[in-house]
Image (cartoon, grey):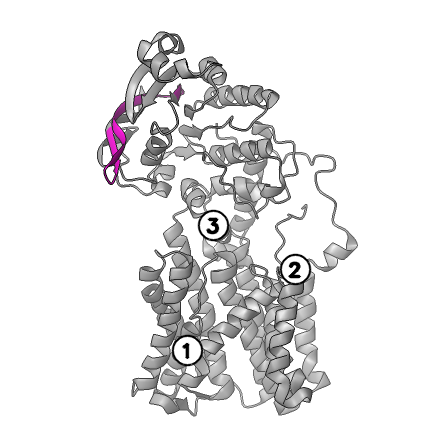
Amino acid sequence: MNETKAPEAPRKLGAAAPRTRLSKLFDNRWAGLAGLLVALLAPFVNASNYALSIMTSAAIFAMLASGLNIVVGYTGLLDLGYAAFFAVGAYTSGVLATRFDLPLLVTVPAVIVVTVIAGIIIGAPTLRLRSDYLAIVTLGFGEIIRITANNLPVTGGPSGIYGIPSLTDSPVTFYYVTVAIVAIAIIGASRLGRSRLGRAMRFVREDEDAAEATGVHTYRVKLAAYIAGAVWGGLAGVLFAGHLSAISPNSFTFLQSALVLMAVVLGGMGSVPGVVLGAIVISLLPELLRGVADYRYFVFGVLLIIVMLVRPQGLWPARSKEALK
Amino acid sequence: MTLLEVSELRLAFGGLLAIDGLSFSVGEAEIVSVIGPNGAGKTSAFNCVTGFYRPTGGTITFDGHSLLGKRPSAVAAAGISRTFQNLRLFGELSVLDNVRAGSHLRLRQSVFDALLHTPRYRRTERECTAEANHWLDFVGLRGDRYSEARNLPYGEQRRVEIARALAREPRLLLLDEPAAGLNHAEKTEMLDLIRRIRDLGVAIVLIEHDMGLVMQVSERIVVLNFGKEIADGSPEEVRRDAAVIEAYLGSDTHA
C-alpha cells in the first residue's frame, strides 16, 4: 500500500484559480525582497543618528515579532511573557561581553545555549496547560525573569549593565549588520513555518487531539516552538544589547511583551510578512506621531483599535489557500 | 492472525462504568463493526484503544505489543489511525495540508533541512504532497484541495478526514460513524470506500448507526449495551440474537 511514487494528481478544472499578477506581487518572496530593499535604501533617505537608531530598533522589533509568531501564530500558544527570552539573550550577551571583554558576536553560541535552556525550563512545566492558563503562567515567568535581573548582582541590579561593546563603531554599519541578521532570522522563521515541524505546529493550533491522532507528539512540538521562539528572542536581545550598549530591567517589562504580541496580532497571526509589517507599524508609528505631541500614545491606541475593528484578521493575514506550483 | 486484542477492558468515570469488561479482537484486513445504543460505550472504547482515555482495567494489545499507557501519537506510530465522531479537521488549513498531517510520522526531514532548503527538504516535501494527492484521489475527493478544509461540504470533509487517516498508512483504521450525516448516494460511496480500504490490507473497526451499511460491510459485529458486550458474531448471527433484538434492533425500525 506504499504508493509514494504516485504521480501528482492532475489539476482539476476550476479547482483553484491560477495565480494572477496581483497575487504574485504579494507572494512572500517578492514581498520579502521589496521589504529588504526598503530597509537597505532607508539610510539614503535619512541617515541621522536619530533615524538610524529608530530604524535599528524597528528591525530588532521585527525579529522579535517573527520569533513570537512561531509561538503564537504558528502554534497558537498565547505567550504573555516573551520579553523574558529577549532579556535572557540581552543579559547573557551583555554580562559575557562586559565581564570577559568578549566581542558581541562571540557571545552568540552561549546565548543560544542559554536561551534553549530557558525555553525548556519555562516551557516544560507550562506547556501541559491549555490556552488561558498558559497565558497567565507565561506572564508570571516574564515577571520572574525581570525581577531576578533586578535583584542579582551579576546583572547589575536595577541600573543594569552598561558599556556593552557594539558590533561596529558606526551606527550605519550596525544598522546594516542588524538588517542582515534580522533578514536571515525572518527567512528562517518563514522556512520553519513551511516545513514538517511548522505544519505540525499548525496542526497543534487547529486541533490538538486530531494532531495527536495523526501521530504528532503535541507536547514536543509545543516545546520545539517555544525553544525556537526563545532563540529568536534571545538573538534579538544580543542585537538590542549591542544597539543600546546599556540594558536594564526596565527594557523588559510586561509592556514590551504586550507590544510584541500586538505586532503579531496587528500584522496577522501566522503570517510572516504580516508580523514584520505589524512590527514596523508598532515601532515606527509612535515616532511618526510626534506631531501630535502629548496625544501621541492616545492616537496610537485609537489607531490600533480602529485597525483591529476594520481588519480583525490583521493587516496582512496568513493565507491558507495554496498556490499552485 | 489477531491484530488488535482488547480484553476485559474497563473504564470508569468516577462512579459511572462506561465500559464494563469489554473483550473483542480484530484480525488482519478484517472489517469489524461495533454497534449499540447511544451511550453504550463505543466511542469510549475507541478512545481507550487510541490512548485518549486511560482504561481503569483490562489489556489492549496491538500486534503483540501493549498499548496501555501510550499517548495517542505513540498509538498512531504503532500503526493505528482513527477518525472522529464529530469531524476534527484542521479547518483553517488547506485540504492538502490536512492530509499531509498523515505523512508526519514517515517524513524524514530535519529542522536543518527546512532552514537550509536542502535537496532532502525539496524531495520530502514533493513526496509528502504526492502522497496527499494520492490519498485524496483514493477517497474520491471532488472539491478544491488547495483551499481551506472548512469550506468543503460536509460529505467531502468526511473524505478528507479518512484520507488523512490513510496517509498514516495504518494497519488498523478506526472509523467513528463515517456515514453520519451523509445522504443515500454518499453512503453507497462510503460503503465502497470502506471495502477498498480493506482491500489495501487495512483492518477496520467501524462504529456506525446505519444498520444497512453495517450489515452489508461487516465481517463481524460486536454489540455493546451499557458498557458490556452482549453479542459478537457474523451479521447473520447478530441479526438473530435475542439479546441484541431486545437491546437495540427491537427499538430500531429500519434495521
Q: Name the residue tied to disc 2.
A: A28
The residue located at (61%, 20%) in the rendering is: B185
Q: Which residues are magenta?
A: B9-33
Q: Amino acid at mark 1?
A: Ala
Q: Does dot 1 land on a helix, a strand or a loop?
A: helix
B209 left or right, relative to A300: left
The residue located at (43%, 34%) in the rendering is: B82
Q: Amino acid at mark 3?
A: Ala
Q: Chain of mark 3?
A: A
Q: Is residue B73 above or below residue A52?
A: above
**Considering only order in the chain, which callout, 3 or 2, is on the residue closer to the N terminus?**
2
Q: Amino acid at mark 2?
A: Asn
Q: Name the residue tied to disc 3.
A: A200
Q: Which mark is residue A87?
A: 1
Find residue A155 and report its horizontal and vertical position in percent.
34, 85
Find residue B32 and report its horizontal and vertical position in percent.
39, 20
Q: Is residue A184 visible?
A: no
Q: Is residue A215 visible?
A: yes
Looking at this view, name the residue that lies furthest to the front. B251
Q: Is residue B29 above or below residue A247?
A: above
Looking at this view, name the residue that lies furthest to the right. A21
Between the C-alphas of marks 2 and 3, the distance is: 21 Å
Instruction: Characterize the magenta stretch by its predominant secondary structure.
Output: strand
